Every structure is written in structure tokens, then in C-alpha cells.
Amino acid sequence: MKNDKRIHGRRGALRLVAGLGAAAATGLVAACQAGAPEQTAPPAAGPRAAVPRNPAAYRLQPMAGGLPPGHREAPPVRKEPFLELPDVGRSVVLTFDDGPEPTYTPQILDILRAHDVRAMFFVCGEMVSYFPDLVRRAADEGHLIGNHTWTHPELPKQSRAKTKDEMGRTSEIIERTTGSAPRWFRAPYGSWNAYTYQLGAGLGMEPLAWYVDTMDWSEPGAGKIVRSVLDGLGPGRVVLSHDGGGVRGQTVAALRRYLPELPRRGYATALPHP
């Protein structure tokens, strides 16, 4: 039941933002946080990034030969995602899903910059189309941008054509926005199947899940989020949090608290090696 509620809540949020431009979506988020009443009609949409209706052909057929310049060679097809990353020493890997989001993503980026920390952001392509500057900022500040599909569906329940569109279209807009194709993919809800592994590898991406789930999507309180991170520390472990998909004030507050604690416990943060 909780998972169903989470799924429907995220889908609803994405669909609502999908109908608005960047300025309108930002205003809607601010209104929701302030408890303002819903508007009877959405405000006029601001300019939005041009988004291709379909991913580029090479994104869907990369294993047929002739990868474009700079595109990563297809990695081996895995049967399960990474939960921990090797060769990063006594470090943890911080990841944030479902953004970019105009209220919380900038706050998280500010905190990470203040602590000289790099993280991974698994973005939804639909959100990138509305807030490309946030994704460019994250990439420019040294964070890795990963593919989290276009609209955050549960992929094993989709057709192959839909899955191709969700993953390929998102890789396309990430590359166009940042100048680099994503090298990591995360399936929404951690729901994978053989085809997602095969397609992800064909698009040049490795599958990454998580070892530590902060459960921040359920708003358990900043203290519980902090404890879940610190109690789950271990070399190479991947920590899951969210910068989008809902109200993330607790995530921001927790990040401020646990980042200074990591070095005191002998841990650094790291990114996957290229």
C-alpha cells in the first residue's frame, strides 16, 4: 500500500509539472509549500527547452555498429545492478533521484559545494526539459548525471517500445544539456528486468541501485534520515536520497547534518571511476 501511494504520488507530481513551463512550475512548487490554494487555471507557461519527440536513432541502435564520436563503448550486460562500487576506498557514494526540482535541487547543490562534495543525480528527462540550467549547473560543478527515465514509470510493466522511449529520450536530453551522455542508469522504484539491463548497456550505461535507502520520500524526519546514512556506512556503499518527486526539506536538513559527520567517522565521498 505504501509503495502504491508513493508511485501514484510521484506520477501525479510529474504529470502536473509536465503541463507547465519552468516559470509556472516554480510558482506552483512555491505555492504548495506555502499552503496557498490551488489556482483555478494554471498560469501561462514560460519558455521550455525544445525536446525531440523521439530519441535519436543511434540511441536506440547503438550495438549495430558505428557509435557516434565520444559515445561510450557498450559495457557488458549485467543481470543485477550495483549496490556498492569497488575501488573507491573508504568512501560512500551519495545519489539523488527524481530531479531536477527548482526548490530543493539548488539547496542540495549549495550544501555539496560548501563541503566540496560530489554526488550523482539521477534525473527524469521530463524534469530536465523544464529545468535544464539546474542540470547544467550540477554537471559544471563536477556531479555525475544519470538516467532515471523520462516520466518515472515502472519499466517492467511497460512495452519494449515505451521502455526504449523512456530511456533513450532521457539519454538524449542529458547529452544535449550537459554535453556528455550518461554513463549510469537507475530504474524507477528499483524495478528492473532483463530488457532494461540489455537496453541500458546498449546505451552505454551501467545499472546502479543502492545499498542504503534513506526512505526520505516517506518524510520520516531529518533525524531518521541522518541515522540511516550513518548506520549504513561502509566502503563503496551507495546511498539513495531524493531531490525531486515531492517535498524534500527533510532531505536538505539531513544532508546538512550528516555531511560534516562523515569525515569524523573516517569516511569520504566518491564518484564511480570512468
Image: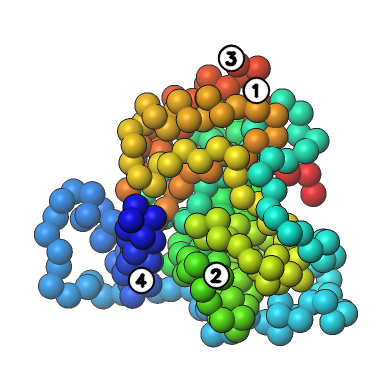
Q: Label 4 belongs to which residue? A: 15
Decide: is 57 above or below 112. Answer: below
- Which mark is in front, 2 or 3? 2
The span from disc 3 to disc 1 (Cα, nearest Å) is: 7 Å
User: Looking at the rendered structure, which numbered label has been put on residue 264?
Assistant: 3
Considering only vertical position in the picture, is 193 above or below 30?
below
Which residue lies under the disc numbered 2? 155
Q: Are the residues at dot 3 and dot 4 in contact (C-beta closer than 8 Å)?
A: no
Residue 129 visible to the viewer: no
Work out whether mark 1 precedes mark 4 in sequence or the reverse, and give the earlier one: 4
Residue toward you, 36 or 193:
193
Mark 1 = which residue? 267
- Residue at image x 67%, y 82%? 56
Q: Count all numbered tags in the image, as a single digit.
A: 4
> Residue 22's spot in the image, x, y percent?
37, 66
Find the distance from the CA under tag 1 to the CA under tag 4.
39 Å
Left/right placement of residue 196 relative to residue 8 reads: right
Q: Residues within 10 Å of mark 3 (few under 14, many from 20)?
A: few
Amino acid of disc 2: Leu
Nearest the viewer among 173 and 195 is 195
What is the spatial separation of the Cα atoms under label 2 and label 3, in whole angstroms?
40 Å
Q: Earlier in the sequence, mark 3 or mark 4?
A: 4
Residue 274 screen position, x and y as percent: 79, 49
The amino acid type, in three-letter code, at marker 1 is: Tyr
Q: Position of residue 1 (x, y in %)?
A: 33, 56
User: Disc 2 to disc 1, how far (Cα)?
Assistant: 34 Å
Q: Tell me how far mark 2 sits from mark 4, CA to CA.
A: 17 Å
* Amino acid type at image mark 4: Arg
> Around disc 4, counting alpha carbons within 10 Å, would you say few (fewer than 14), some (14 to 19), or many (20 or more)?
few
| Helix, strand or loop under label 4 | helix
Secondary structure under the numbered disc 2 in the rendered image: helix
